[in-house]
Structure formats: structure tokens, C-alpha cells
Image (tube, rainbow, N blue to C red):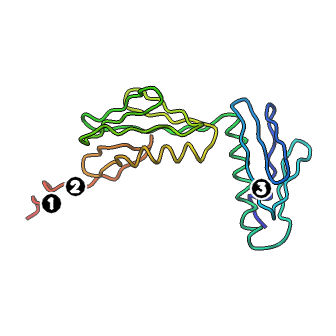
Amino acid sequence: MSKIGKKPIVIPDGTEIKIDGREIEVKGKSGALVLPIPSFIKAEIKDKELIFSPENNSKQARANWGTIRSLTNNAVIGVMKGFQKTLEIEGVGYRAVMEGDTLVLSLGYSHPVKFIAPEGVKVSVAKNTINIAGINKDAVGKAAAKIRAFKKVEPYKGKGIKYQGEIVRRKVGKKVAGATK
């Protein structure tokens, strides 16, 4: 039995959920998302709650039962509140600027790095922070990871792009290592 799969999803006010064959459509004030349901998972709405259950006791059904429940719960949260990731840029000369829908990053390379946000993801810049927002948790996370991958924080000087609140383990440089001899 899946601990997560057994929990019902409470449908909040202002959110509409339709089960159409093998798809779940979630509509809210921020937009709409459509999720496919695997053939061995059954979904039903009872008393303003969405309940998932496996149709058979196969290993695949048990494995995907909690997963599809979590994905649907993320869709409900996404259409109600949305998801947001914040990245911080540290380093002399490192900066980010929006040119229309394109994020242009100056990261110490010989050329500016350009990032076009995927559909459904909104990118904005304020000083040395980049905000990524959207209703799809997966798309927001992937966009943030792609931007961060352009220049991850290095451990010696702490220069690069990091998630807000991320702790970077700093390493000691050559100066201290040579002083011990």
C-alpha cells in the first residue's frame, strides 16, 4: 500500500477537475494543466476529493499509484498558487538582463549566454536575482536548473549562479596549503 497514494486530494474552491478517459484536466485561476493517467490507475471524484487507486495489484500499478497522486497534487497547487524558484548571481561583472523574452547572462565568458524561457514559464530579473515562475512545477524546476548549469558556483571564490538559500561549501585555496610547510 502506498502511503502517498492513499491520501485523497482535497479540491479547493476555485479549482475544477475533470476526468476524461485516461486524462485529468485541472483548471484554476492561474491556468489549466492536463495530466495523463496510466492504464492501471483509477481516479474518481467523491465529495470534493480526488481519490486514486490501483486497478490491479501489479508491481507497476503500485509503483505509479503514489507518483500520479503527487503529480496531480502539484498540478492543483500550481493552478491555484503557482511555483517559483529564485536564483542568485555572485561575482564581479556577473549580471543578468531581460531583453524581451530572452534572459541574457554575462558570466565571465567571451560571449553573453542567452536563455529563452519555455512556454508557461515566466522569467524576471531584479538586481542580482533571477525569478522563475509558472504553474507547472516540473517546467519551473527544469528552467531553473538549466540557468544554474550555465555557471555553477565554484567552491574557492563562490562565484556563479546558485539557488536562493543554497549553502556552498567553500574550499581553502593554495595560500593556506603552502603555509603549512
Q: Residue furthest left?
A: 181
> Can you say whether 79 is above or below 67 in the image?
above
Q: In the image, 52: left or right of 115?
A: right
Choose between 12 and 109: the one closer to the eye: 109
For the residues bearing labels 2 and 3, Cβ distance under 8 angstroms: no
Within 10 Å of disc 3 (Cα), the crowding (few <14, some 14-19, many 20+) is many
Q: x, y (%) of residue 130?
A: 44, 34
Q: In the image, 69: left or right of 181?
A: right
Per the image, the residue denoted by label 2 is 172
* Mark 2: amino acid: Val
Q: Residue at x 54, y 40 (%)?
A: 118
Per the image, the residue denoted by label 3 is 37
Q: x, y (%) of residue 75?
A: 70, 44
* Mark 3: amino acid: Ile
Which element is circle 1 on? helix
Per the image, the residue denoted by label 1 is 177
Choose between 111 and 151: the one closer to the eye: 111
Q: CA distance from mark 2 to mark 1?
A: 8 Å
Which element is circle 3 on? loop
Q: Which mark is residue 117?
A: none
Whichever of callouts 2 and 1 sits on the residue coming sooner in the sequence is: 2
